Image: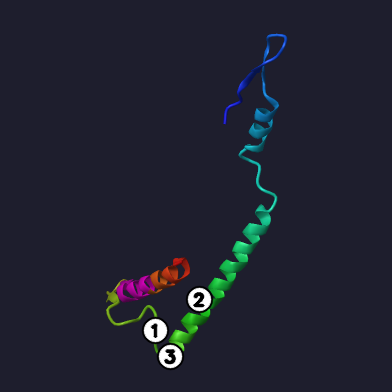
Amino acid sequence: MRCQPVWSGSGARQASPTAQNSAAANIPNERPPRYAQSVGRFLILAGVALVFLGLVVIGADRMGIHLGRLPGDIRVEGRRGGFYFPVVTCILLSVLLSLISWLFTRR
């Protein structure tokens, strides 16, 4: 936002007081006073989500659904190493996360 010049009685140009105040409010390093609270809430929610995800993985393993070792996952092993790509697990997680996202974003 640019300051608009205002003509004073002496003929000198000055920035209007409202333009100066609005320019000072748009300083890029200034953060809203509740920034720390919102970051804290986000970190707490992320932690709760990770705990929930961990419980889901443990529960799935106990029920016989071994994420990462489903039929269709690619595994190639040689003498000096191996390659593993969980194709079916990736597709299953993608569908599950898409469903969850759809449930939370529908109106």
Residue farthest right in this picture: 10
Q: Are marks 3 and 2 in contact (CB under 8 Å)?
A: no
Mark 2 and mark 1 residues within 8 Å of each other at the beta carbon: no
Q: Residues within 10 Å of mark 3 (few under 14, many from 20)?
A: few
* Type of amino acid at the residue the image marks with label 3: Met
* Picture disc at residue 63: 3
* Eye-nearest disc, 1 or 3: 3
| Magenta region, residue range | 82-95
Amino acid carrying mark 1 in the image: His
Residue shown at 40% from the left, 72% from the top: 99
- The crowd level at tag 2 (other Cα within 10 Å; few <14, some 14-19, many 20+) is few
Residue position for label 1: 66
Give 45 or 78, whichever is nearer the viewer.
45
Q: Residues within 10 Å of mark 1 (few under 14, many from 20)?
A: some
Mark 1 and mark 3: Cα distance apart in space? 8 Å
The residue nearer to you, when weighing 69 against 14, is: 14
88 displayed left or right of 54: left
Residue 39, horizontal then vertical, whole percent: 62, 58
Q: Which mark is residue 18?
A: none
Q: Assign the N terminus to one quadrant of the image.
A: top right
Secondary structure of the residue carrying tag 2 is helix
Name of the residue lying farthest toward the top: 11
Amino acid identity at mark 2: Leu
Q: Which mark is residue 53?
A: 2
SS state under label 1: loop
